[in-house]
Image (tube, coloured by chain):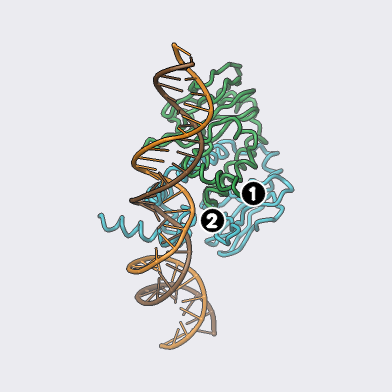
Chain colours: A green, B cyan, C brown, D orange
DNA sequence: GTCATTTCTTGATTTACATCAATGCATAGC
DNA sequence: GCTATGCATTGATGTAAATCAAGAAATGAC
């Protein structure tokens, strides 16, 4: 488990890499994302303080996700093997599954506005720290659509 | 860890239940799903042989998912506490995370046709066993949309 | 400071999919 | 057997969000 500094913009892992690294964020902000065949970027996860960021690819298979730093970030790096040996943090693992479950349900049942409202409620601190286009990418909508949703919501107040 | 038989149509768990049960499918087919505020059903997971089906809700918080049997099914039931004590199957847990990761990426980047093609490639045996409307529900599209996709694909051949 | 690049917004248009409605086909119950 | 219920398909219409395009505003480089 090695502590390292990552500069804003630095890429830790690329899609296709064979990597079994796990990043635990101490401070700063990471993100993991894919780029699809049409060249569109989709953010899979924001990794703020205390989050664990990793691709779930099996050992020796190519990763699906890019991981980079949105802010200057301090992380602890471990290999999956190390983490498995020490006995992984089950609570964290289950919380992660819970996050993913919520995300899937949200993606299947919510429209743009509902997704945005859910996001600002669940991650109130993230929205201040990233450009809106990244929020849109996380929500699975376009920046234009997000702009209109936000506009509509501010009208109402 | 108790082995029980479940009849087709039987409901094992309802949304809102406080339950920490985990179902490991020995034979047959379970499904977990939610019903949103608009009354629409969204299938979260199909659980065929050897799959683990459970809600990831924390202990003593209400579940989000319904779980029922699509076929007559034999399952092993454990509580989360039991499973944690015995040391859970980490490989299974990671595979599950991988499945969820793929699902999220698919939901964000694929249209109806791509989702369907991905589904029949990934779960070739499921499609024979469930009504198409459940496949549609899993894919996050309507039965009508699925019907049109399938129609279009069969034209091409 | 200026200039360049990226981000955000606004409007017009298009498109994929949902919704609504009707009909055909099964399967199950009696 | 017949009737009822659920499932699948097809067509017509509606709609949320994508796409395309152009400016405005913010950010960063020098």
Q: Residue at x 47, y 46 (%)?
A: B107
Q: Is residue A20 visible?
A: yes
- Sequence-earlier tag: 1 or 2: 1
| Relative depth, front residue between B79 and B11 | B11
- Between circles 1 and 2, the one closer to the viewer is 2
Task: Give the image quarter of residue B90.
Answer: top right
Q: Residue at x 43, y 42 (%)?
A: B109
Looking at the image, how many numbered discs can be counted on the residues? 2
Q: Which mark is residue A7?
A: none
Q: Tell me where residue A2 appears, x and y as whole percent.
A: 60, 16
Identify the element where label 1 is drawn.
strand
Q: Tell me where residue A143 appears, x and y as whole percent.
A: 48, 39
Q: Which mark is residue B22?
A: 1
Q: Tell me where residue A40 appears, x and y as whole percent.
A: 41, 37
In the rendered image, the residue lying farthest to the left is B157
- Decide: few, some or many residues near mark 2? Use Cα within 10 Å; few <14, some 14-19, many ≥20: many
Q: Is residue B47 visible?
A: no
Q: Which mark is residue B42?
A: 2
Distance CA(mark 1)–CA(mark 2)? 20 Å
């Amino acid at each position: 488990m090695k502590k390292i500094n990552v500069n804003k913009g630095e890429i830790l892992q690329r899609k296709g890499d064979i990597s079994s690294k796990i990043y635990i964020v101490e401070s700063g902000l990471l993100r993991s994302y894919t780029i699809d065949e049409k060249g569109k970027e989709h953010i899979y996860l924001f990794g703020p303080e205390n989050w664990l960021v990793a691709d779930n690819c099996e050992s020796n298979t190519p990763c699906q996700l890019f991981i980079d730093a949105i802010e200057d970030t301090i992380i602890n790096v471990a290999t999956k093997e190390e983490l498995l040996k020490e006995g992984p943090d089950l609570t964290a693992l289950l919380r992660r599954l819970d996050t993913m479950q919520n995300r899937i349900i949200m993606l299947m049942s919510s429209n743009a506005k509902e997704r945005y409202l859910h996001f600002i409620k669940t991650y109130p601190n993230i929205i201040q720290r990233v450009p809106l286009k990244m929020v849109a990418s996380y929500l699975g909508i376009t920046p234009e659509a997000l702009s209109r949703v936000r506009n509509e919501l501010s009208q109402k107040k």
